[in-house]
Amino acid sequence: MAQRTVALCDGKFIGIESIYTVIDGKQINIPDKLEQLRAKSRNNELFCPCGCGANLVLVAGERNLREQHFRIKEGFDGICQMPVEGINSIDSKIALKCWLEDKLHTDDIESRVPIRTVSESERKYEFTFLSAKKKVALSFCNEYRNLSDDKFTILEQHSNGNSIIYVASGDKSETNGQYPEGLMKIQRRQGYCLLLNVDGADYSKAELTVVYYEKNADGVWEKVNIARDKLSKFDISDSSQIMYHNHSLCDMLKEKQLEFNKHQQAIIYQRELDKIHAEEAWRADEERRKQARIKAEKDRKAELERREKERIEQEKIAAEKKEQARMKQERVEVEKRQKRQEFLKVINSGDCPEDRVLTDEGGRRWVQCEFCGKFAPASAFASYGGFGKLNKGKCYECSRNPNINTEVNVSEEKSRQKQRYDPNICPECGGRLRLIQGPFGKFMGCENYPTCKFNRRVRKK
């Protein structure tokens, strides 16, 4: 923090910045001002502005500019309530004092001028600087919390025809998208904000940034730069307009606002265009999804129809197979009945045929005993078959009965068999014999297999 930077002399406030000026672009102390203030301090004519009654002495020399201030004379034992001013504030005021003298070319610039000295008002607000000859007043604010509507209203109502230049410290000008309430109070009155950044109390290093704040297309507050350069590069016209490279900041503001608004409109237009394209793309996607759903539903129905058709076809095939099986079963049953009827007819007639093997409806072979004449399955016979006796045989009862004459004239029988022998006729059932290729070679087998299992090996020549 800087030390005491202001004194009360002849009823006026004198800031430490009043001892500086600019000559040929170089910042220097004003020798006459220094001598005048030192004389005032020797005569005890410099007082503390807080009203404590302390006499002050000017501390100024060729050392670092920050060390120059007003100090209470030794011997004061009262209580001083003078607030301490920050270094950035006093350095900014020194740079602004030098700038005004550099650009206005006048020697009547007063600092810390209460409005009561220019108007009939008892309010405690003050102009940081005032040139009565040039009709220019400057109000500097280091802390944005001091930018009240009441202060601006009072300053404007009691400016007494002086043009007011509002300057604020640039240390806290970033808003991070928030509404810059304090700076907007300046912007509403001035059209733009003058933001000062200093590097110590050196006027040649001070920078001025001209900005205005506006909501962008996202609704976020944005700081728009109009100009930025050394403070010394900005001029003040005879009509109290701030000029930069011979261009009025008001004109530059209009151009920048036009450019900014055009850019924001372009963004809004592009977003609207993107929105339209996005909606079109969404509708196209929705249409594709709709068509996909229609196709999926169509495919689903087609699949259901195919499955239903397949089911009906399978049921039809199954029904046909069932009908075929039923008909086959009926035919089998009919054949069985026919075979049984034929079998029973043969059995009842007592005349056993010799042209085919006698079987019942179950396929079992039946044989008639040539001694007792009964018909029975072949399993009840001790022997059966042979030439001329296809369905004849001897049952087990007759074969065990010694009273039955079973003797046969062997020579006659052999002679009869020899006369009747045919190598292509099955000797057991009378069926035709055929040549068959088996796993162990060729053999002659009965055509009535498996009912008749007679076979004969073929001899190799």
Image (cartoon, rainbow, N blue to C red):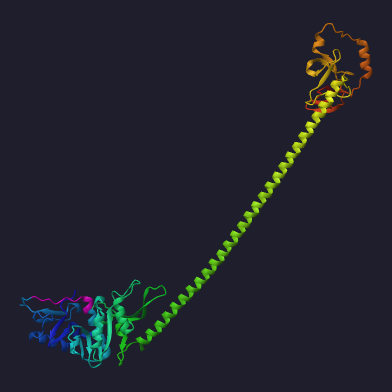
Which corner quadrant of the image does residue 22 belong to? bottom left
Viewport quadrant of the N terminus: bottom left
Image quadrant holding the C terminus, namely top right
Residue 32 drawn at (x, y percent): 16, 89
Q: Decide which of 310, 180 is in the foreground and name it.
A: 310
Describe residue 13's horizontal placement relative to residue 155 as left or right.
left
Residue located at (94% from left, 18% from top): 419
Tell me residue 40's x, y (percent).
Answer: 10, 86
Q: Quadrant of residue 171?
A: bottom left
Looking at this view, is 289 or 55 the one in front? 289
Mark count: 0
Query: Which residue sits furthest top?
Result: 403
In magenta segment, residue 83:
yes
Looking at the picture, does residue 332 appear above or below residue 23? above
Instruction: Using the rendered image of the protein, determine whether residue 264 is visible from the camera's viewpoint.
Output: yes
Q: Position of residue 313 (x, y in %)?
A: 71, 46
Residues in magenta, as a range = 79-90
Q: Was residue 7 drawn as part of the magenta stretch in this picture?
A: no
Q: Is residue 456 above or below residue 78?
A: above
